[in-house]
Every structure is written in structure tokens, then in C-alpha cells.
Image (cartoon, helix red, strand yellow):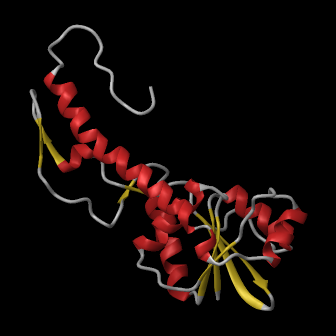
Amino acid sequence: MILMLAEKRSQAIKIAEAMGWHYRQAQSKIRGNLHKKPLTLTWAAGHLLKYAPVEQRAQITEGAIKPKLIPISEKSRYSGSRKPESYLNTIELLINKATSIIIATDPDREGEAIAYNILNHFNCTLPIQRLWLADGLNRSAIGKAMEHLLPPHKTKSLYRASQARSLSDWYFIFPSMAYTRLNSHQEGITSVGRVQ
């Protein structure tokens, strides 16, 4: 069975409609076929996994922050929003039945990150192809993309870029929190952060 992983339910439904795969509203997966091979399409709900908050990895006191000097775990933590466990449980069951994966998330850094964070979380080593939906989610664009699935090395650099950005932000928080804690007694605003 081929497992196709979309980023969100609305995206999965558009893919299913374009391919003529039938679905019911209450389903957490859609069954179809691709080149006469059975396929199951399921979806995430955006970022289901992320690195644990700095507050969980450091001892924060009134005047300072004392890192525990624990390296970042390779396994991400549940984000806690949108009930990620139910999505992850469904995806895990389907990965265990699959023979290959087609990533069908958005064609950008975050789409790659959503898919690879999930696949890495479950130590998935199945063959991967990429459904690159850069031309949109209309019937014609989806059909064309299905006929030209990409090998993973063509797009995985986007995942690496997203990972680098997330980790650099994560590491930046340690000194930022220490600085703001140490200067919290001063009047005025202490400004830190990449986005303000």
C-alpha cells in the first residue's frame, strides 16, 4: 500500500476529488489507487511536532536562566494544539502498513518540515516520493504532478532550511531569556527576537 501524506484535510480532499477517489466526511483517510496500486491518503493538521519549549529544558529563576546543558533531543515534542495525538496515531498505523510514502504537503519549507518531522518521529525508512503541487490544487495541476512525482533529494533541502531556522531560533532563546531576566528590573522595554 502506498501512503500519501497531505498537510491538512482540505488539501487531501482536493487531491482525492482530482483523482476521482471517493471519501466520506467523517473519515481520517481516503482510499484510492495510483497506477493500479492501492493507495491511502491521510493528513496532518499543520505542525504536529516541534521542539520542546526552552522553559522545559532550562531552570528559570527570578534573576537568571540556568541551562541544564542537555542537548536538543532528535525526537520532537507534541505541540499540544489541535489534539496531535489522534493524527499521529492514525499516521503511525498507516506507516506500519505502507510499502512507500508520497509526501503531498505544501510545496515550501514548512510543508517539507511537517512531513519529515512526522516521518522521522516514527523512524520511517520507506521509499519516498514527492507530489510537488507548485501549480496549485486544481484538477489539471494535481493530475500533472501525479504523473511527475519527484525523488526526495529534489526538495529535501527545503526541510533542512526549515530545520536550521527552527534550531537557530531555539538556541537564540537561551541567551535572550537570560538577558531579559537579568534586565527585568530596569524601566522601559527590553526588546529581543527575530520577529517584533
Q: Quadrant of residue 37?
A: bottom right
Q: Quadrant of residue 132?
A: bottom right
Asked if residue 58 is positioned above or below residue 114 in the image, the reply reads above
Point 81% across, 74% down: residue:
21
Residue 169 position in % (x across, y down): 37, 44
Asked if residue 47 is positioned above or below residue 100 in the image, the reply reads above
Residue 114 position in % (x across, y down): 53, 60
Point 25% across, 33% down: residue:
176
User: Can residue 80 be seen from the camera position used here?
Assistant: no
Numbered label tally: 0
Point 47% across, 71% down: residue:
89
Taking 85 as reference, is 72 left or right? Answer: left
Taking 147 as reference, is 63 left or right? Answer: left
Residue 16 position in % (x across, y down): 79, 69
- The foreground one among 7 and 27 is 7
Taking 138 as reference, is 46 left or right? Answer: left
Asked if residue 167 is positioned above or below residue 30 in the image, the reply reads above
- The foreground one among 148 and 3 is 148
Q: Residue furthest right?
A: 140
Q: Quadrant of the N terminus?
A: bottom right
User: Can residue 193 be seen from the camera position used here?
Assistant: yes
Q: Quadrant of the C terminus?
A: top left
Point 33% across, 21% down: residue:
191
Residue 194 position in % (x across, y down): 41, 33
